[in-house]
Amino acid sequence: MAKQGYHHGNLRQALIEAALRLIEQQGPQGFTLSDAAKSAGVTPAAVYRHFAGRDDLIAECARQGFAIFGDLMEHAYNDGKPTALRAFEATGRAYLAFARKFPGHYMAMFESGISLTSDPTLARAAERARGVLLRAAEELTRQLPPNRRPPAAMFAAHIWALSHGVVELFARGSPGTRSPFSPEDLLEAGIGIYLRGLGLVPADG
């Protein structure tokens, strides 16, 4: 079985998908390279033809996750349409949707301890995803007078942190962190408070 698995044409991706399943079930630190090989139906030796080690496999899971995440963020941003405000809010919702739909990728990206600068392709994929939120922040802050305009990078970092916190505590957190409000409502309210504080939406909007 292992030999047949090795010779089929897409073993590399099969190993990635096996690792993603294991990450979802056991966490990014809860499985070995041998576990991934067994799940994919190959010997551990066959894995080393595609990956230098376990961290290399997890890094590729993270890279693919950032690629999917970037696509979702780009789609949500929609070139700033219909308005800069609506596009910005959509990117926050896309963050939450990604974490729910792709938990294995999300955990590989943010909970595995893998350095995002460990591989150039991983670094580029992560930067592209961050870049969508940065562009959204830049477009929105242009509506403010220069003397009241926060740095777009800071603005984007605040919203990233808010989105990540809602995901970690209320979309993926333990039962003890449950809220009477949905993660979507928490995120929308948090973004609204932040934007009202900057004067980007009316106080009663």
Image: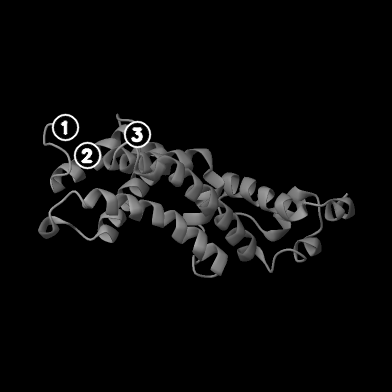
Q: Which of marks 3 and 2 is nearer the N terminus?
A: 3
Judging from the image, what secondary structure is the residue with disc 3 in? helix
Please give the name of the residue rendered at 53% of the width and 70% of the height, measured from the top-left corner. 118
Dot 1: few (<14), some (14–19), or many (≥20) neighbours within 10 Å?
Answer: few
Residue 88 in percent (x, y) is at 32, 43
- In the shown orientation, is residue 17 left or right of residue 96? right
Say if mark 2 contacts mark 1, CB within 8 Å.
yes
Say the numbered circle drawn on residue 192. Answer: 2
- Viewer-nearest of discs 1 and 3: 1
Q: Which of marks 2 and 1 is nearer the N terminus?
A: 2
Name the residue carrying label 1.
Answer: 205
Q: Quote the CA–CA distance across marks 1 and 3.
A: 18 Å
Say if mark 3 contacts mark 2, CB within 8 Å.
no
Residue 29 in view (yes/no):
no
Please give the name of the residue rendered at 30% of the width and 32% of the height, measured from the top-left corner. 185
Name the residue carrying label 3.
Answer: 184
Residue 178 in percent (x, y) is at 35, 35
Residue 26 in view (yes/no):
yes
Observer-nearest residue: 32 or 161?
A: 161
**In the rendered structure, which amino acid carries the disc numbered 2?**
Gly
**In the rendered structure, which amino acid carries the disc numbered 1?**
Gly
Q: Which of marks 1 and 3 is nearer the N terminus?
A: 3
